[in-house]
Image (cartoon, rainbow, N blue to C red):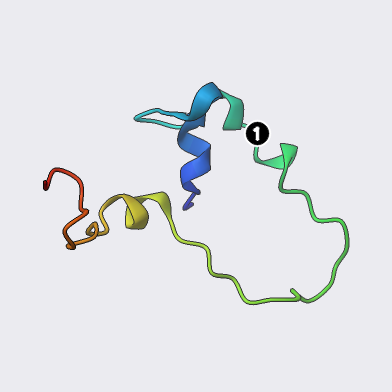
Amino acid sequence: MPIGVSHYLIRDNVTLGSLSPRRYFRTQCHVPQADTKPLAGNTFKDAEDVRVAPGPAGPNAAGKR
């Protein structure tokens, strides 16, 4: 199951190489409140898709000066 980048973060926005221990129980924040249609389309991107996406190629790109 894909998960968001925020699920790899711990306190102070430090990124882990694996799922944060604070995110083990999906039902802590993803509990349906009603059986309704979504109000907006889903634009979720899996953390793996975001991580492997190429960065900016402009003059301000990381590592270029």
* 34 in relation to 22, above or below: below
As rendered, which of 19 and 58 lies closer to the eye?
58
Q: Position of residue 50 (x, y in %)?
A: 35, 55
| Local secondary structure at mark 1 | loop
Q: Position of residue 23 (x, y in %)?
A: 59, 32
Residue beneath label 1, please? 25
Task: State the residue lying farthest toward the right.
Answer: 34
For residue 26, what is the image quadrant? top right
Residue 20 in sight here: no
Q: Position of residue 18 (x, y in %)?
A: 39, 31
* 2 in relation to 21, above or below: below
Residue 39 in sight here: yes
* 54 in relation to 7, above or below: below
What's under tag 1, amino acid-wise?
Answer: Phe
For residue 38, what is the image quadrant? bottom right
As rendered, which of 36 and 8 lies closer to the eye?
8
Residue 16 appears left or right of 11: left
Residue at image point 84% right, 72% down: 36
Q: How many marks?
A: 1
Q: Within 10 angstroms of label 1, few (less than 14), some, or many (20 or more) residues? A: few
As rendered, which of 30 and 12 lies closer to the eye?
12
